[in-house]
Amino acid sequence: MPLPPPVYRERLWPAWWVFVATALVIPASFLVLLPISVPAGVVTAVVLYGAIVVALIATTRTIEVDADELRVGRASLPRVLITRASAALGPEAVAERGVRLDARAYLLLRGWVRDVVRIEFDDPEDPVPYWLVSSRRAEELAGVLGQG
């Protein structure tokens, strides 16, 4: 049986500046190997940067909400268990990721995504108190989950 179409879908791609910042591995690795061999430096620089780009893309996670379930990366939560979803923007998001963070919470945080959604649920058998998820459209995600 096919999955129902998603009500909400977001892919947490790295920001453009992450690719630019990690490109600094190119001159760094080239300069390290330059005294040994110019071709080795060029090849190493290209291979290292390529590996970083592949790792960034491979670790990109998706947030999906359909009629029955919230899926965050490989984790899933039935919507009937969700009791509250609230968006935290700007300084509130910093506080949620920092001083207000419960170490038992399930986290899907990306440093290049500023805002987060705190998803509280009622499952007495789960020791996780809530999920904290990065989202570029935090208010929209919280709104969709609040309609569950």
Image (tube, helix red, strand yellow):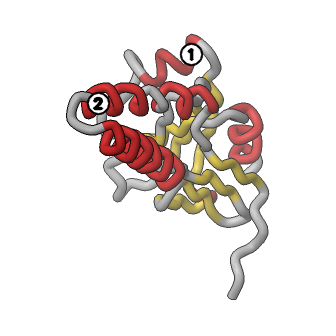
Of tags 1 and 2, which is closer to the observer?
2
Asked if labels 2 and 1 touch by Cβ distance under 8 angstroms, the answer is no
Residue 105 visible? no
Location of residue 45 in the rendering, given as x and y in whole percent from the top left corner: 39, 39
For label 1, the crowd category at 10 Å Cα-Cα, with few meaning under 14, some 14 to 19 and many 20 or more, is: some
Q: Is residue 128 above or below residue 134?
A: below
For residue 43, side relative to residue 117 (left or right): left
Q: What residue is at 50 percent from the left and 25 percent from the top?
A: 21
Amino acid type of the residue tagged 2 in the rendering: Leu
Report helix, strand or loop for mark 1: helix
Alpha carbon separation for disc pair 1 and 2: 47 Å
Residue bearing mark 1? 92
Residue 98 image offset from top left, x and y in percent: 40, 19
Q: Position of residue 42 (x, y in %)?
A: 40, 40
What amino acid is found at the position of numbered circle 1 in the picture?
A: Glu
Residue carrying label 2: 34
